[in-house]
Amino acid sequence: MNIEPITGGYLNVTVEGVPQRIYVEQAGQGRPVLCLHTAGADTRQWRHLMNDAGVTAEHRLIAFDMPWHGKSLPPEGFQTQEYLLTTQTYMATVLAVLDGLGLDRPILAGCSMGGRIALQLAARHADRFSGFIAIEASDFQPAWYDIDWFDRPDAHGGEMGAALVSANISPYAPERERWNTLWMFMQSGPGVFRGDLSFYTQDDSLIGLLGAIDTGRTPVHLIVGAYDLTCTPEDASRTAAAIPGATLAVMDELGHFPMSEHPAGFRPFFLDALGRMPAARASAA
Amino acid sequence: MLDIFRDIQSRLEDSPHLRRLGRLFSETILIEVDGAEHYLTFDRGRLVQIVPGPSRRTPWRFALRTDAEALHAFWQPRPAPGFHDIFGLVKIGRGRIDGDILCLVRNLRFFKEIMALPRARTGACA
């Protein structure tokens, strides 16, 4: 048998009054690290780190598929809804998963829109976490594309989304992982990538909050890839500079999906980030 | 530049998966390099005609305008950041895309991969 050490299950929680059945994967033991995927994708982006014994020996990695993504179904009645993620709903979902799993002040690691919400949570709910790793994250990114491209009845939004986000993948990424990364976007449900991008490209509420983040209590470490066209090193640098005490690492050979597109290249940067986080406290779960 | 477009044409003939990707793509597009126009006509995923400009009478669906130095950097096995993608060229101010953008986006993977075909000459990833 060659079975990976990742285990999955379904967590039933209520988010803003709406029942949600959320798919959660876990691997490892020790200091809990809650991992958030990017827009238009799912938990599979984290599978390399969750299979990395050098990471999981001392860390319990937990990742979940946001509602509408991966193996988390959309809520009842979705067929008449327009999916548009908001900062409030996103934060409420992360906190509901925290409560549902009984996690006590985990490290929060998020990429892209997951990094954005990690910074929002650092500003608004820092007491629920021990530290923040914000990957390909910035204060605000207006779209350089039309988000409506990705939700059309006359074209395949997943194929168009994948073709667009390939612009953010480094030429150093192994071909296999480049295409595995793109496959998740190709599989994304209709309108989901657009709904995520609505949050990511239109909500600028974080800008005024960055200066209030207390990195003395909860450290914030940003990581950004040089090949990321969406959140460039300049965007991440601007964001880090606005957070007193935040640190930043630039990855010269990586892009917007580092843990997924080039896991070997990302590994040392993630281990470095974990090393910057506070020592573990006992976890309730 | 004509040689490179003919190379793309030849490589496309040898790439059945790309022709399948482009099987619904029958359009003329404009590639402008340092102000020199090149009209590329596709028929169901095949590049059937390469006509140098200038021309005011040739209708085109969308255009990519850039410079030879940027394309040279784009066609390196591992391009520098910004030169690794056509949208990167736009982002760093070395390219412009106009015309029917929705047509481009609906055929984006096909267009991006045929434009990257010259990278294969050095055995690089597309």
Image (cartoon, rainbow, N blue to C red):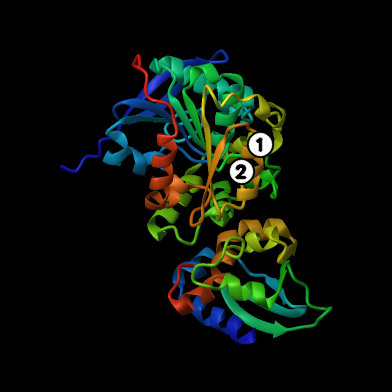
The answer to whether residue B54 is above or below residue A142 is below
Q: Which residue is mark 1?
A: A139
The answer to whether residue A271 is above or below residue A130 is below
Q: Which residue is mark 2?
A: A236
First-in-chain label (1 vs 2): 1
Which residue reaches farthest bottom?
A: B3
Q: Residue at x 44, y 55 (%)?
A: A178
Q: Position of residue A275 (x, y in %)?
A: 40, 35
Query: Residue A121 is drawn in which quadrant?
Result: top right
Q: Are marks 1 and 2 in contact (CB under 8 Å)?
A: no
Query: Residue B106 is drawn in which quadrant?
Result: bottom right
- Seen from the viewer's position, the closer of residues A285 and B24 is A285
Amino acid type at image mark 2: Ala
User: Taking the image as drawn, is residue A39 in sight?
Assistant: no
The answer to whether residue B87 is above or below residue A130 is below
User: Taking the image as drawn, is residue A273 in sight?
Assistant: yes
Quadrant that contains the C terminus of chain A: top left
Quadrant that contains the N terminus of chain A: top left
- Seen from the viewer's position, the closer of residues B2 and A38 is A38
Amino acid type at image mark 1: Asp
Q: Residue at x 37, y 51 (%)?
A: A264
Q: Position of residue A145 (x, y in %)?
A: 69, 50
Question: Secondary structure under badge 1?
Answer: loop
How far is the residue under mark 1 from the one under mark 2? 8 Å
- Seen from the viewer's position, the closer of residues B29 and A273 is A273
Q: Is residue A279 left or right of residue A135?
A: left
Which residue reaches farthest left?
A: A1
Q: Position of residue A25 (x, y in %)?
A: 36, 30
Q: Is residue B48 left or right of residue A208?
A: left
- Chain of the residue displaying label 2: A
